[in-house]
Amino acid sequence: MARSRDPGDRERLLTGIIELCEAGQAIGAPADPDIQRLLDSIFMTLVVEAERDIRQRLSERLADAPWAPSALINILALDEIEIARPIIARSPVLQDHDLIRLLVQATLEHQIEVARRPRLAASVVEAILARGEPAVLTALASNDSAELTSDAMGRLVSRAKDVVALRSPLARHPRLSSELAEQLYLWVGGALREALQTRFHLDARAMDTAIDDALRSAHRGETPEGEDPLENTSEREEMERLLVEKLDSAGQLRPGYLLRVLREGRLPLFIQALARLGSFEPGQIRRAIDSNRPELLALACSAVSIDRSVFPTILDHVRQLNGGRPGGGSEGARRASSAFGPFTPDIAGMAFRQAVGAV
């Protein structure tokens, strides 16, 4: 079989060796170093040339084997994700330093699987927090068995200000403290706030008052004393999103609000408000105003029923607040005027989403 190039023979040989190893493990046979070295060599030689489906079946078979060669397990852990997944999730052969190496060397999908691994050690948790990849942090927050210290939980809650996906798993995490719950309360939506109130017996009135105070400060563009506004950008953006959400819920968010906040020099609030009014993503509005195509901004404004006569003023304010962007000069402004053609706001919104997707 070893001399055969037939994939079936190669797989039967691998299966036979695995069964011999499992039988030896079952009767408690000692691991002879010479035999172990021979097994390592055989497995590595066979697996390197094995087809994908053979490697996948081998991965499932060896995922729970404590006797599996370390070099082989590490190679399978770096294989394509469908092959690597059971190894990363279950193999007792993988050590903490192996998992940390995966966080550095492997793809994002591999890193997410590392963060999901049961009973993840504190050293691996620290490596995940240090890298700060949002998708991996979210997987970690959903891993109730990971060794998360109070400091690690605090760092995750702090990241929840700008990583929306973290909020729901953190709100339900068994290691969330009441102090951290109060901090997280500022960033979550209504349903999660109710869950936090019930679980930690939070004073809803006091918490809502704190949110209202923060929203009023954000609306006035205030920065707490001693705080660098550049270091507080993500928090301010979240406050502005909550303010827009609250105005919309109260029926007070109207197209005229856009010109008002621009006159106050509040470009981020303009982005959030325009996105909310048009059911756009804030990132779409940001791409539009950072482009050299003012007609994109015009389409977004047309979609929320801004009048053609008002748009030049809006464009002028946006350019003043955004370093001269969107560019295009007077020719760009002329093209923008055509965005207020004889079509409905719905059509303008569809055209905006399609056009900004190409930017």
Image (cartoon, helix red, strand yellow):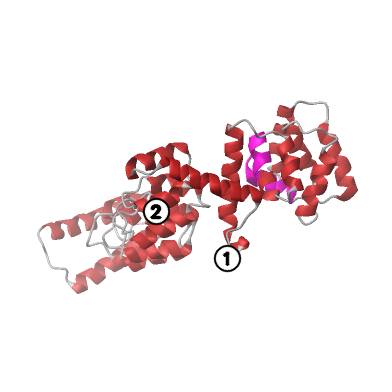
Report if residue 75 is visible in the image: no
Task: Kindly identify the residue that appears in the image at 86 percent across and 46 percent down.
Answer: 332
Q: Is residue 351 left or right of residue 156?
A: right
User: How far is disc 1 from disc 2 in space, using C-alphas?
Assistant: 23 Å
Query: Residue type at mark 2?
Result: Leu
Q: Nearer the viewer, mark 1 or mark 2?
A: 1
Asked whether 187 falls inside the magenta stretch, the response is: no
Task: Kindly identify the residue that appears in the image at 34 percent across and 43 percent down.
Answer: 201
Residue 341 vs residue 170, the one in the foreground: 170
Magenta extent: 272-290
Kindly give the residue lying farthest to the bottom in the view shown. 34
42 is higher (above) or lower (below) than 183: below
Label 2 residue SS = helix
Residue 204 vs residue 251, the one in the foreground: 204
Q: Which residue is mark 1?
A: 226
Circle number at residue 180: 2
